[in-house]
Amino acid sequence: MEYVTHRLIEQICEEIVNQNLDLFSSHALLKAQAKDYVKDTQMRLILQPVINGLIAILKNPITVENQLTKILAMRCEESPLEPGYLGGNILNLLCQLKTDLSENDFSDLNLVAKRG
């Protein structure tokens, strides 16, 4: 399980840096309806390592925030209603980074993934 989690984190970081967001859009990094202890574990084992990996690649948290908000802005402009986890994943990463989101408008962003 550790190997799979490690590979997921590496792949997500690579996708965010390269803006090729297949896995990042199709898989939730944090399950919103999970119990608090499960969300805490997901934050500790997935979200924070993704942030740490992005900081290692992009050199600082501000650059990571900028990259995430750039991707979010592009998605809102290009295909805001496209189903998937991209919007929720980015918001969760920005919250984990303790980014001030008060000046942002996310009303055009689809935060609900398509259920199959």
Image (spheres, rainbow, N blue to C red):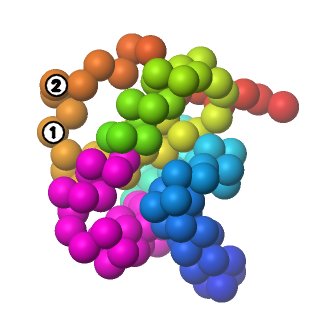
Point out the image quarter for the C terminus: top right
Asked whether 28 or 10 is in front, the reply is 10
Picture residue at 39% right of the left edge, 31% below the top: 73
**Residue 27 appears at what percent x and percent y?**
65, 50
In the drawing, does residue 27 fall left or right of residue 60? right
Please give the label number shown on residue 103: 2
Asked whether 82 or 28 is in front, the reply is 82
Query: Looking at numbered disc 2 in the image, what kind of residue is underneath it?
Result: Glu
SS of the residue at dot 2?
loop
Q: Are marks 1 and 2 in contact (CB under 8 Å)?
A: yes
Picture residue at 36% right of the left edge, 75% below the top: 57
Asked whether 97 or 69 is in front, the reply is 69
How far apart are labels 1 and 2 at the CA level?
Answer: 8 Å
Picture residue at 32% right of the left edge, 78% below the top: 56
The residue to which callout 1 is attached is: 100
Residue 53 lies, with reference to residue 103, above or below; the image says below
**Residue 52 appears at what percent x and percent y?**
34, 73
Picture residue at 46% right of the left edge, 71% below the top: 45
- Mostly what secondary structure, the magenta segment? helix
**Residue stretch rendered in magenta on the structure:** 41-68
Please give the label number shown on residue 83: none
Q: Quadrant of residue 113?
A: top right
